[in-house]
Structure formats: C-alpha cells, structure tokens
Image: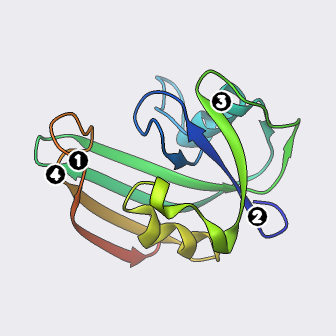
Amino acid sequence: MREGKVLLIYKKRGLGKGLYNGVGGKVEDGETPEMAVRREAFEEIGIRVGEVEKVARIFFEDRKGVQMDVHVFLIRSWRGEERESEEAVPVWFDVDSLPYANMWEDDRIWLLRVLKGEKLTGLFRFNDIWGKEEEPRMESFRVVPGVC
C-alpha cells in the first residue's frame, strides 16, 4: 500500500490466472510465511520488501479435499521499482476502486476490511478451488476479528 493505493498483480499463470490478486505463493521448506512473502515479492515483481504487517489468516477448503492456509501481509515500504515478470503484471488501484469482478469471490468479503486496518481470520469453502471441473463458487464463509 502507498498513499491510498494498493498494488495488486494480474496473474499470468498458475492458480488465479487471469485474476488480480496480491503477491504470494507457497512457503518453501525452511521458510516462515514472512520469509516467503519477501521471496515471492522479489520473484514476482522485483521489489525488496521492508517491514511486513500480518493482517489476516485465511483458510480455504473445497469439496474435493483441497485445503490452503493463507497468511496475509500488508507491505508499506520496499526498495526498487515494481516490474512485470513471467508470473505477474503489477497494477496500482485506488483502495476504493478495486477490480472485484476480476478477483477471487472471497476478496470482496475480506480485502477492503484489512486494507482499512482490521485484522481478521477467515474460513471460506468453495466447490472446487482449482476450477478444473466447475467454476469455483464459494459455498460458505466465516470471518472473525483477530489473526491466528
């Protein structure tokens, strides 16, 4: 985040291809979630992250048994200029004009809340997270204050 704007990426491949999302990826062996967000930010958009603030922990699951544990961080300082990579195109948006129509369904429930300072934990259930057999449609969700 910077001056009322948020930097998202347009995913060019992988899970979420064709959608806007935050920088992220899997935590590798020996990494903490904080280490992973620093590595992913450099790999995906070429920036060196300064201080990170954990603002949410969100659990995702679907009927096929897929489960994801997502740690969400806000980054307000970094070094370098963001750049496009094979994975992503960085795009700035006004906080109040996020492209929800081209984002994951759950984002419209929790994202603005954390961008405006709330910390939360959430659980979202989808039909099929990977979207291989059917459109990923959210079945249910629960969001509560606080971060695990």
Question: Residue at horizontal 43%, vertical 40%?
Answer: 16
Residue 5, label in figure: 2
Relative placement, left or right, of 67 versus 50 is: left
Question: Residue at horizontal 71%, vertical 47%?
Answer: 91
| Label 4 Cα crowd, 10 Å radius (few <14 / some 14-19 / many 20+) | some
**Mark 3 to mark 1: distance in Å?**
26 Å
**Looking at numbered disc 1 in the image, what kind of residue is underneath it?**
Glu
Q: Where is residue 128 shown, x and y percent of the image?
A: 19, 45
**Mark 4 to mark 2: distance in Å?**
32 Å
Q: Where is residue 129 shown, x and y percent of the image?
A: 26, 44
**Mark 3 to mark 2: distance in Å?**
19 Å
Residue 42 position by quadrant? top right
Q: Are marks 3 and 1 in contact (CB under 8 Å)?
A: no
- Quarter of the figure with the C terminus: bottom left
Q: Earlier in the sequence, mark 1 or mark 4?
A: 4
Q: Are marks 1 and 4 in contact (CB under 8 Å)?
A: yes
Relative to 30, does residue 146 appear above or below in the rendering?
Answer: below
Determine the residue located farthest toward the left in the rendered image. Answer: 63
For disc 1, the marked residue is 135
